[in-house]
Image (cartoon, grey):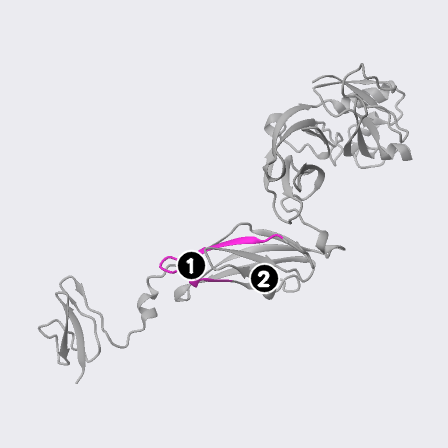
């Protein structure tokens, strides 16, 4: 005889199989059943699969990535990683699994090259590049009840470096153009495609620790085309390229020199805006004209002149030179113009200020302004004097 179980008024009762429904509320269909009497739920006690009973209570898993783009290099050490955050309602997060389920180009990074560590809500995902190139990786979380969710990670791999153990890759910047050490193993890096300054840990590949953008303080809306930097004490001097854009058009924002003040060191480094100047290029052109157009600055900055051509005008580097006594000098390196072997190397000028007054080359005097540039040893001669701050 088939026996059924029911709950009536909070207590289990046992009945026998019969046609119809018994007075005790037991369904008599010939199968184990669940009956409800009043406000109480009756659960058949025999033969039910627990996972089936709870499957409907599990939500769809969620997955998010700390970055949707990741880069690395073949054979690199300490490549950056991505944080993967997962969750599922009704389930313990430790029961969720995360793995790469697909690669759009397995020759660059197959799914087996993707490792995920950790068992909590946040996991670490790393990729070991197999070859140079690009691939889209599908990252999949599998939860209880067989429910899944995915995210796409865009991955780019560089070719192997000669010394992978000593090579680090700083992400978030496409055209790093200048760097200044701030102590504690950290460095502030500029980019000639944006005005953002980024603080990186030199010992680790990955994204910047901090960023600063002083565009509003400087009052510029386009790229300064930062190409050089020099630190003197707690002040960093940053210079734009001072040249035309790639189409030979004058863009005032590129004719910018500005300063930042450094406080703290290492990961605690902070930068604050100092001052800026937007006429250095004009001063240099005027000085060159007054001295026989020796370097062709006027021609190099003319409308239509491409800055990176041999007869253009383009600053590519800047360094401060220690001085035994004031005034201190600074050296800038020019990609163009290339009037001579010496002119291709460097010439000297002072860093930055709110006003500039070019002067003819002569031996600097301690009686003059505390920041002056003099003719460099490499044979070129351009000197400017700061008249006010």
SS at mark 2 in the image: strand
Q: In this view, does 54 lie above or below 253?
A: below
For the point 64% across and 47% down, the residue is: 171
The reply, left or right, for residue 355 in relation to residue 366 is: left
The reply, left or right, for residue 205 in relation to residue 120 is: right
Which percent across, then down, holds residue 220?
A: 63, 28
- Quarter of the picture containing the N terminus is bottom left
Q: Distance of mark 1 from mark 2, alpha carbons?
A: 21 Å
Residue range corresponding to the magenta coloring: 80-98
Which percent across, then down, holds residue 342?
A: 89, 33
Instruction: Residue lying at the far left in this picture: please name it.
Output: 23
SS at mark 1 in the image: helix
Residue 33 quadrant: bottom left
- Quarter of the picture containing the C terminus is top right
Residue 312 quadrant: top right
Residue density around tag 2, few if under 14, some if 14–19, many if 20 or more, within 10 Å? some
Q: In this view, does 64 lie above or below 356?
A: below
Instruction: Residue lying at the far bottom in this picture: please name it.
Output: 1
From the viewer's side, name the closer residue of 209 and 340. Answer: 209
The reply, left or right, for residue 356 in relation to residue 16 is: right
For the point 71% across and 27% down, the residue is: 257
Q: Can residue 219 be seen in this view?
A: no
From the viewer's side, name the closer residue of 25 and 310. Answer: 25
Residue underneath mark 2? 114
Q: Tell me whether the residue at label 1 lies in contact with that at label 2, contact meaning CB atoms closer than 8 angstroms.
A: no
For the point 52% across and 63% down, the residue is: 99
Residue density around tag 1, few if under 14, some if 14–19, many if 20 or more, within 10 Å? some
Q: Can residue 201 be seen in this view?
A: yes
Residue 93: give its label: 1
For the point 12% across and 74% down, the residue is: 21
Residue 35 quadrant: bottom left
On whether residue 73 falls in the magenta region, the answer is no
């Amino acid at each position: 005889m088939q026996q059924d179980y029911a709950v009536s008024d909070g207590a289990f009762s046992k009945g026998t199989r019969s046609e119809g429904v018994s007075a005790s509320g037991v369904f008599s269909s010939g199968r184990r059943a669940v009956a409800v009497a009043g406000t109480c739920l009756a659960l058949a006690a025999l033969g039910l699969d627990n996972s089936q009973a709870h499957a409907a209570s599990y939500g769809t898993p969620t997955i998010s990535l700390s970055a949707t783009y990741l880069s690395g290099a073949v054979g690199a050490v300490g490549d950056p990683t991505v944080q993967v955050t997962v969750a599922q309602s009704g389930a313990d997060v430790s029961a969720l699994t995360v793995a790469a389920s697909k690669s759009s180009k397995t020759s660059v990074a197959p799914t087996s090259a993707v490792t995920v560590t950790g068992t909590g809500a946040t996991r670490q995902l790393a990729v070991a590049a197999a070859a140079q190139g690009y691939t889209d990786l599908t990252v999949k979380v599998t939860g209880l009840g067989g429910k899944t969710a995915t995210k796409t990670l865009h991955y780019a791999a560089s070719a192997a470096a000669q010394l992978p153990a000593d090579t680090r890759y700083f992400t978030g910047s496409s055209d790093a153009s200048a760097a200044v050490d701030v102590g504690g193993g950290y460095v502030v890096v500029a980019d000639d495609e944006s005005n953002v300054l980024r603080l990186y840990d030199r010992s680790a590949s990955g994204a910047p620790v901090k960023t600063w953008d002083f565009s509003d303080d400087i009052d510029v809306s386009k790229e300064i085309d930062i190409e050089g930097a020099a630190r003197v004490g707690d002040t960093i001097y940053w210079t734009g390229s001072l040249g035309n854009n790639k189409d030979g058009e004058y863009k005032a924002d590129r004719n910018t020199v500005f300063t930042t003040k450094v406080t703290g060191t290492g990961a605690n480094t902070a930068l604050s805006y100092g001052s800026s100047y937007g006429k250095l290029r004009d001063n240099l052109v005027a000085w060159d004209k007054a001295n026989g157009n020796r370097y062709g600055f006027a021609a190099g900055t003319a409308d239509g002149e491409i800055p990176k051509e041999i007869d253009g005008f383009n600053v590519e580097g800047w360094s401060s030179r220690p001085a035994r006594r004031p005034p201190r000098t600074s050296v800038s390196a020019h990609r163009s113009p290339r009037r001579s072997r010496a002119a291709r190397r460097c010439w000297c000028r002072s860093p930055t200020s709110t006003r500039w007054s070019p002067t003819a080359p002569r031996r600097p005097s301690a009686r003059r302004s505390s920041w002056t540039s003099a003719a460099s040893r490499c044979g070129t001669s351009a000197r400017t004097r700061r008249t006010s701050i």
